[in-house]
Image: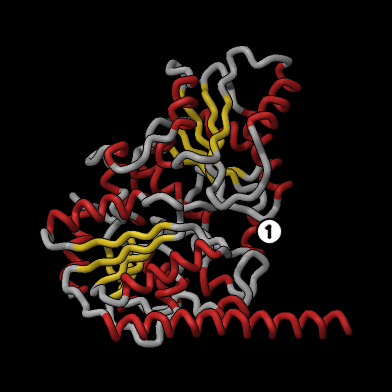
Amino acid sequence: MIKEKIKEFLLIILFCVIKIIIFLIDIIYNITQIFRKRKNHKICMLSRQSNDITLNFSLLKEEIEKQDKEAEIYISCMRFKFSFKYIINIIKDLWNLSNSKIAIIDGYSIPICNFTNKKLKVFQIWHSFGSMKSFGKNTVGKKNGRSLFVEKVFNMHKNYDYIFASSKAYSKNLVSGFGYGEENCIICPLPVVDVLNRKKKLYNYIIKNEEFEKINKKLDKKKKTILYAPTTRNDFETLESAIFDILDIIDFKKYNFVLKMHKNENINFSQKDIDKYLKNKYNNLNGINAYIDNNSLTLEYILISEILISDYSCVIYEAMEADTNVFLYIPDYNEYIKNTGLEVDLKKEFKDLYAEDKKTLKNILEKKYPKEKMEKIKNKYVTKNENSTETMVKIILEKGR
């Protein structure tokens, strides 16, 4: 009883501290507006997905500058970390937002969601393609979701004017996760679709990653490459078990293997773990090409892989756009639904493409791939567009001004 009272008291204190910080952020924004005149051609792009400019933002920036020669673009990309540097970055964001007409974000944004006096149009371009796991407001209170405390204190997903969804089939799931209606939704795939469809070259828009280049050179080009890209998890044992299951059933005479962890994954799993497991199984690593990369873009590997194995990640839709064969390995299906939730019936939607145990996974990998089925799913979740980047920018400039 005493412990519960102490916990409750500490939560109240934390609530008050966070609310004071957010209140100060809002004051700074409102003060800066007094001294700043809004510019018709000023656009802010904010992300906490990475510390480098994201691929979608790079593509949008190039296209905005084509369509608006007077465009003034401010881009801020910094992953959340409670530090003095992050607070300074938020103040810089507020200063630039105060005289902008348009803001583009690809996830939750502290300054955007905590305005009380919003005078610009906000476009949410969320960083995934299709329906999969529940997120945002649909997971509040669940084991792997946000708490009601966090949702309320941080004003999760407030102040959006428009939300981009890659298809009508995805729109309902997307806007409900943010707590909006479909009237706020615009159907247009993310700019990255143009790279997946080979209409734009990836390396024109990203910093070349040395780790990717190093691993790519080691892959045996006579073999097909299997990429395993699972979603982020709180359960180390489940993920580790799934990794070893897949290593068990791969025929390394026919396949290379690359494990690409989710960028937000905190589980400590390394190349040494892979090598140790395979040495115990095969005695030596001669002729075995199996690697892990925790730093490169998953997209880089999608573009060089013939097969993607994932679980509850929307990366599967990106792979489908790139014509990479997709399989789901979901040994913890029922548990995942309980703790996180899913917005799509995987067993119905991906029949013949999923496995709940390694024996079944091995069998479906050896069967002829149902290309027509994949094409049907792809067309359902990603609307065809000749130039998604161009279309999105046209919409943003038209509705934003």
Name which residue lies at 25% across and 66% down: 43
Total count of labels: 1
- Which scheme is used to colour this image of the protein? secondary structure
**What residue did someone put label 1 on?**
335
Q: Considering only vertical position in the picture, is 282 above or below 174?
A: above
Give the percent coordinates (x, y) of residue 154: 53, 77
Query: SS for tag 1?
Result: helix
Give the percent coordinates (x, y) of residue 215: 49, 26
Specify the farthest residue to the right: 1
Give the percent coordinates (x, y) of residue 28: 41, 81
Name which residue lies at 64% across and 70% down: 142
Mark 1 crowd level (few <14, some 14–19, many ≥20, 10 Å Cα): few
Q: Is residue 373 visible?
A: no
Q: Is residue 99 visible?
A: yes
Quarter holding the N terminus?
bottom right
**Is residue 197 left or right of 47 when viewed as pictured?**
left
Residue 335 is drawn in which quadrant?
bottom right
Give the percent coordinates (x, y) of residue 24: 49, 82
Residue 68 is drawn in which quadrant?
bottom left
The type of residue carrying mark 1 is Glu
Residue 287 is drawn in which quadrant?
top right
**Is residue 234 left or right of 111 when viewed as pictured?**
right
Quarter holding the C terminus?
bottom left
Q: Considering only vertical position in the picture, is 214 above or below 153?
A: above
Specify the farthest residue to the front: 35
Q: Nearer the viewer, residue 360 or 85?
A: 85
